[in-house]
Amino acid sequence: MKRTYQPSKLVRKRRHGFRARMATKGGRGVVAAGSAPERKTRSLPATGKPVGAHPKRLLKRAEFLAVRRGEKRRGRLFLVEVLDRSDAEAPRVGYTVTKKVGNAVVRNRIRRRLREAVRTHAAGDMEPGNDYVIVGREDVLTIPFGQLKAELSRRLRGTR
């Protein structure tokens, strides 16, 4: 049986690695251009209020199932399930989207939008000692992000 030639990692590293690139004039030029003082930065300066950190996450199936026994706050964009753990620890949040909603790409996009809305805006509306599960719906993708944050904040506070 014939086998194709597969170079070892060491050979590849020596042939295509950092040292090999720096031995050429072009390679040294790339590094010099990247560290030049007149080089423009690619990122924009931060504006507005600083965003919060991600709240603690629910990860285990048992934790998600326990929250289902708590209070349910329904909305057209998502369902928020809340369980009071009766302790003073930081609130925890979990995100889920049912398989009825699109394919995996769509479901992950919904989860990412919800996670970012909680991180930037609604984390302060969560009460310590509570667990939250946010069940996203398809409308989360079409609504403007500002409205999503306002709706999420309202649901987490428990007002209609």
Image (tube, rainbow, N blue to C red):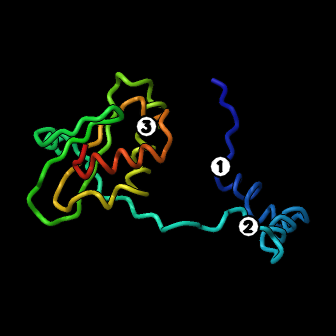
Q: CA distance from mark 3 to mark 2?
A: 31 Å
Q: Residue furthest right?
A: 25
> What residue sits 33% from the left and 58% below the top?
123
Q: Position of residue 130 (x, y in %)?
A: 18, 55
**Do the residues bearing badges 2 and 1 touch, measured as CB atoms within 8 Å?**
no
In the image, 45 versus 42, the foreground residue is 45
Q: Is residue 12 above or below residue 74?
A: below
Amino acid at dot 3: Ile
Which quarter of the rendering shows the C terminus? top left
Callout 3 touching callout 2 (CB < 8 Å): no
Pointer 1 local density, CA inside 10 Å: few below 14, some 14–19, many at least 20 = few
Residue 107, picture quadrant: top left
* Mark 3–mark 1 distance (CA, rounded to whole Å): 42 Å
Q: Which residue is mark 3?
A: 110
Element on which disc 2 rests: loop
Instruction: Name the residue beneath numbered marker 2.
Output: 41
Instruction: List the residue tagged with mark 1.
Output: 8
Q: Position of residue 70 (x, y in %)?
A: 12, 42
Q: Residue furthest front?
A: 160
Q: Residue at x 82, y 74 (%)?
A: 36
